[in-house]
Amino acid sequence: MIVTADEVNRSFKGTLDLLNSRAEGLKSFDMSERGFWRSFTALWLTLPAYVVSLAFERLRLGLLQPDRSLLDNLWIDLVVALGHVAGFVALPLAMICVARWFRLEKAYVPFVIVTNWISVIGMLMLSVPAMLVLLGWAPPALASLFSLAFAIIIVRLQWFATKSTLGLSSLPALGVVVLGIVLNSFVAGAMRGLLG
């Protein structure tokens, strides 16, 4: 059940519509059960972001060297891969309980589908500043500024998508977005703690 090029195009178009505060962008997503499961397989599209994360963690640990392979330490590879996957599924898993608690079960599937596609775009966007640092094209301070700007765009996108899919008002939708940020911070902290 691999995601198709047509579905990628439609989902990216829908995400762009949501970024521009157009709720009709939700019509671009496959909201079926099949679309739900395929939205998780979209994680494969973030493989470039995983490679950048892996290189960045090796740089942080002082292990990134031009004459060494990027995949020569199974522990680092595994921990970064687990962190990458956990960051992708943390909010959808947590929302199972939240959706039940607030009786939003019917909106859960559309929320997860849209959130997964936003995560794909978010992971790819946030890997760009790290890649610029790795290539020596931007100092860390400038890359941090880019990361902050991209993060603000993604948070705003997720907020509007949460309002549109779950039918929430602004403040509860912001609460869901903050939950996602907290979960991703926890995943990143756990990953860094395991790597040292």
Image (cartoon, rainbow, N blue to C red):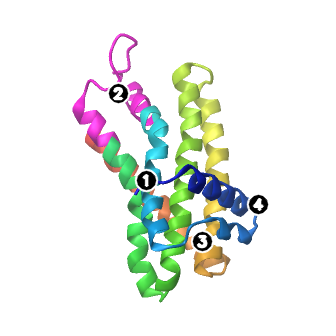
| Sequence-first disc among 3 and 1 | 1
Q: Residues within 10 Å of mark 2 (few under 14, many from 20)?
A: few
Mark 3 near mark 1, Cβ–Cβ under 8 Å? no
Mark 2 near mark 4, Cβ–Cβ under 8 Å? no
| Sequence-first disc among 4 and 3 | 4
**Residue type at numbered disc 4:** Asn
Residue 20's tag is 4
Q: Nearer the viewer, residue 13 or 183?
A: 13
| Sequence-first disc among 2 and 3 | 2
Q: Quadrant of the N terminus?
A: bottom left
181 is within the stretch colored magenta: no
> How far apart are the alpha carbons under marks 4 and 3?
14 Å
Mark 2 near mark 1, Cβ–Cβ under 8 Å? no
Q: Tell me: 135 left or right of 95.
A: right
Which residue is at 65% across, 53% downward? 152
* Above or below 136: residue 152: below
Which is more foreground, mark 2 or mark 4?
4
> How far apart are the alpha carbons under marks 2 and 4?
39 Å
**Residue type at numbered disc 3:** Thr
Residue farthest top in this picture = 67
Q: Quadrant of the C terminus?
A: top left
Query: Residue tagged by mark 1?
Result: 2
Q: Residues within 10 Å of mark 3 (few under 14, many from 20)?
A: many
Mark 4 near mark 3, Cβ–Cβ under 8 Å? no
